[in-house]
Amino acid sequence: MIKLSLPLSVAIPRKTKGDRIVTLNLNTFRNLHHMIANSAKREWVKVVADAVGYQTHLPEPPYLFTYTVFPSSNRKFDLGNVLPAIQKYTDDALIELGWLKDDSYKHISAINYRFGTVDPENPRVELEIASWGDE
């Protein structure tokens, strides 16, 4: 099993006014201009590459992906709003980085979404990738 720690947002560099912070969720994704969404996706590939770090390869497919969110506060939110956007960006990044052949059911057979705990010091999403038979 491999565990990746990912942020809940991505910073898009700008020439003026500092970085633009884009929170990854379906509401943001739906409303973003396509150029900003594309920039966020490019930056997310860098985030995933850093999270992958020294790890050399995934276990054998098919995979079980488990996404656990650790928000910064007790504020109510919808797992189905946050995690699908992060999942899609992450799946595409893993494909671009050569870790996944594709994100079809032949490679990712199951996906779980979970709430962890509130973590004001380190809000994040943890992705656990396991072989389907190892759950």
Image (tube, rainbow, N blue to C red):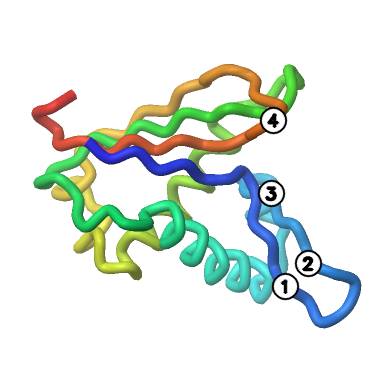
Q: Which image quadrant for residue 64? A: top left
Residue under numbered circle 4: 121
Q: Residue at x 78, y 67 (%)?
A: 19
Task: State which tag comes first along the sequence, 1 or 2.
Answer: 1
Quarter of the image where the C terminus is located: top left
Q: Could you tell me which secondary element the residue under label 1 belongs to?
A: loop
Q: Position of residue 35 (x, y in %)?
A: 66, 76
Density class for disc 1 (Cα within 10 Å; few <14, some 14-19, many ≥20) is: some
The answer to whether residue 108 is above or below residue 46 is above
- Cβ–Cβ below 8 Å for labels 1 and 2? yes
Q: Amino acid at mark 2?
A: Asp
Q: Say left or right for 61 vs 10.
A: left
Report, in whole angstroms, how far the alpha carbon at label 1 lies from the one at label 3. Answer: 14 Å
Report, in whole angstroms, how far the alpha carbon at label 4 lies from the one at label 3. Answer: 17 Å
Q: Which mark is residue 19?
A: 2
Residue under numbered circle 3: 23
Q: Which mark is residue 13?
A: 1
Q: Position of residue 8 (x, y in %)?
A: 62, 43
In-front residue for pair 30/5: 5
Report, in whole angstroms, how far the alpha carbon at label 1 lies from the one at label 2. Answer: 4 Å
Q: Nearer the viewer, mark 1 or mark 3?
A: 1
Q: Could you tell me which secondary element the residue under label 2 belongs to?
A: loop
Q: Say left or right for 108 vs 13.
A: left
Q: Nearer the viewer, mark 4 or mark 1?
A: 4
In-front residue for pair 62/27: 62
Task: State which tag comes first along the sequence, 1 or 3.
Answer: 1
Report, in whole angstroms, how far the alpha carbon at label 2 lies from the one at label 3. Answer: 13 Å
Q: Position of residue 47 (x, y in %)?
A: 51, 59
Q: Say left or right for 122 vs 98.
A: right
Q: Amino acid at mark 3?
A: Thr
In-front residue for pair 59/24: 59
Q: Amino acid at mark 1?
A: Pro
